[in-house]
Image (tube, rainbow, N blue to C red):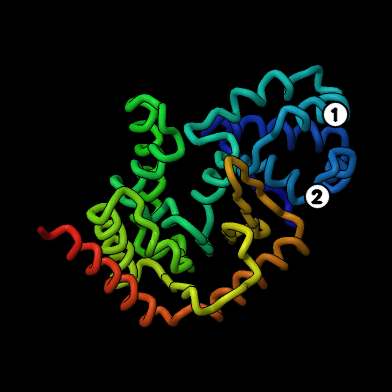
Amino acid sequence: MPGPKDLDPSSSPRALLGAELRHAREKTRLSQEELGRPLFVSGSFVGQMEAGTRRMQPEYARRIDEILATDGFFTRNCKASNKSRYPDHFAEAAEVEAIATAIREYAPLLIPGLLQTEAYARAVFRAYQPTATEAVIDELVAARLDRAHLLDDPTTPLLWAVLDEAVLRRRVGGAAAMGAALRHVAKLARSHRIIVQVLPFAAGAHMALEGALKLMAFADAPPLAYIQGLGTGQLQDDPATVARYELTYDLIAASALSPEASLALIEAVAEDYAHEEQP
């Protein structure tokens, strides 16, 4: 495994914590794999914590303090390094997503967050939290729209989304919001900023019937998979597990409509919603 890069400790609390972890580990002459063993994580996971791309959870911090004899330093400081504007189950995935070179995503029910419009995102969050104040909803929507600035770069990250046909048919926010949301996706596809496919109902059963899947690739780190459920999410870095999810995605994409046929379907459904808006 290549050695960790020099970090700028002033860049973020997590970068500082990662730099200190690397320093403390090297001081004890432990490799990343050797430190990972008693934590029950891989050496690459330790490397990602040192690089500031993976969170140091409190249980890891306590064990690291014991192993490296750091007098509670990591326990005291991991909370500050983990502050995020995103929900806890998604925060780490959002942070690594921001440095990914390629993102491949299967969306079974909703337009992926990076592709959502404001009205669509607002309807989603209001459904998630029907009794939340407008201020809370505004903050969640703002965080989601900020994530979409990843696509301001014309080429990186590569974003390839496979949308289940249910994504197109489920009326989130009403006809006007749905039509605008689908036209937004189509615009990004027509401008060659994203690749989008639709997995039609006619494709039948497939390997990802149980939920959403996001795969992320990086320039200098192993790939990660993110699996999301109801109010839960988990990043996977085990090579065999990630490879299995990559096969799942490949098979889904193979069963989906071509990008050209998918774009035609998305625009046709958007047009149907537009007709519903007319008196």
Q: Which residue appears at 30% of the width and 45% of the height?
A: 118
Residue type indicated by callout 2: Ser
Q: The disc labelled 1 sits on which kind of residue?
A: Leu
Give the quarter of the figure containing the N terminus. bottom right
- Above or below, 25 relative to 180: above
Question: Where residue 246 sits in the image (x, y, percent)?
Answer: 65, 68
Q: CA distance from mark 1 to mark 2?
A: 17 Å
- Give the residue at mark 2: 42
Residue 218 visible in the picture: no
Q: Position of residue 221 (x, y in %)?
A: 65, 56
| Along the line of sight, the residue nearer the viewer: 191 or 43 | 191
Q: Secondary structure at mark 2?
A: loop
Residue 234 seen anywhere in this rendered image of the structure: yes
| Horizontal and vertical percent position of residue 259 | 40, 78
Q: Is residue 111 left or right of residue 269?
A: right
**Mark 1: few, some, or many residues within 10 Å (few <14, many ≥20)?**
some
Residue 68 is labelled as 1
Q: Residue at left 73%, top 22%?
A: 75
